[in-house]
Image (cartoon, grey):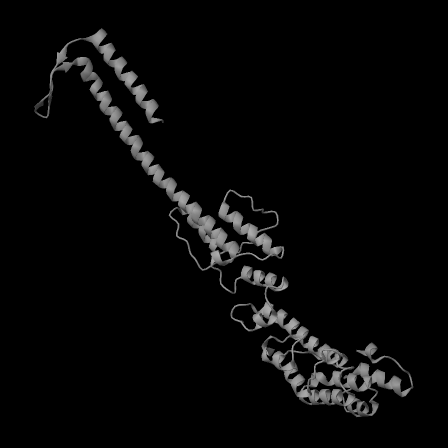
Amino acid sequence: MYIKRYTIASLIFFTLVGWYVYAYVTQESIGLDLFGIPLPSLSIALWVVVPLVVFYLLSVFHIFFYSFMGTLKARKYEKDYEKIMDSIIDAYLGKNDKVYTYKTPRYKLLGAIVHNSLFLPTPELSANTENAKLNQVLKIIDELKNGEVVELKPYGLKSNNKLVAMNNRNKYIKGLLNAEKILSKTDVYDKELCEDAYVDFVKISPLYAIEKYKQFLNKKSLFEILYRVNMVENRLEVSNETLIAMFQALELNAKDYIDISKALSNGFSPEQRIKLFETLSDENEEVMEAYLFTLFDLEMLEPTVEILQNSQPDEFINFKAYSALKQCNKNFDISLFI
């Protein structure tokens, strides 16, 4: 109820009641005692209006009191709404370390759900909501997905945050970060970016620099190193011992070793290539297929005969078939048998 309208209506009512009593009931005056205190003599019409005025004052106090209590309650909901929006924004930003305290039961439940959930904005959710802070975050996420570089310092994100990682990757793609800078600050950049940067780094760097950051070696960067062994320009000279150390740092299977032998077919001399896989096969039985492949690929048939004869009947079936064909003067590409 509007207080101004209520007051005007009350004044009109007081006036009408007083006028009615004075005009149609009595025009006499009377004096009253209130708790032993004599009150001045007033018209009875005024004494009739006095309780109405008191009632009006009490009702106005009642209205103000509950309006004030409602305002406090509404402020609690408003503050909890702001907190839940901040919590959602933190979820989008990947900040899960802050716990918000809510004053209202409904938002307390929603806050617990948000804090223990993973939020990912869908493409349909555009930066056009009623919340300016949320719009800014959605815009930043969208720009990052589109490969743009954004400013994330105001949000205080940690170095291992997924958005920070995306931003660093975008910087690297756009040339704002170089590979060596990334590799030299492993506490700042995520492992995946370091490994990708290392792949590019090994394409042009000398061997000593490659070994300096060898903790980021993976299969992709290993084969980039092997490809350089075959190159005329920017060629990389690598010893068997260095290669063996690299192989041992990775989890390679039989197929990987065969692919390695293929990659070294042009850059290594036959002797060095055979020696490499002979040494590897002595230490790891899984390399034996790659060793046999290397021998057959180099037309070194005699050593393979002894290996195949000493193997189990169910071992190296494909190589035994290839060997039998070779003995019958049938020439096939060894790659067809692996």
State the residue at coordinates (24%, 11%). 19
Q: Is residue 60 above or below residue 110?
A: above
State the residue at coordinates (45%, 53%). 112
Q: Is residue 50 left or right of residue 331?
A: left
Quarter where residue 239 is shown:
bottom right
16 or 163: nearer the viewer: 163
Q: Is residue 105 left or right of residue 92?
A: left
Q: Which part of the image, by quadrant, shows the N terminus? A: top left
State the residue at coordinates (35%, 38%). 71
Quarter where residue 201 is shown:
bottom right
Residue 189 in the image, given as x and y percentages of width and height: 55, 68
Residue 297 in the image, given as x and y percentages of width and height: 81, 84
Quarter where residue 79 is shown:
top left
Q: Is residue 300 visible?
A: yes
Q: Is residue 4 above or below residue 287?
A: above
Q: Is residue 72 above or below residue 91?
A: above
Q: Is residue 177 above or below residue 338?
A: above
Residue 283 in the image, given as x and y percentages of width and height: 67, 88
Q: Is residue 113 visible?
A: no
Residue 205 in the image, given as x and y percentages of width and height: 65, 77
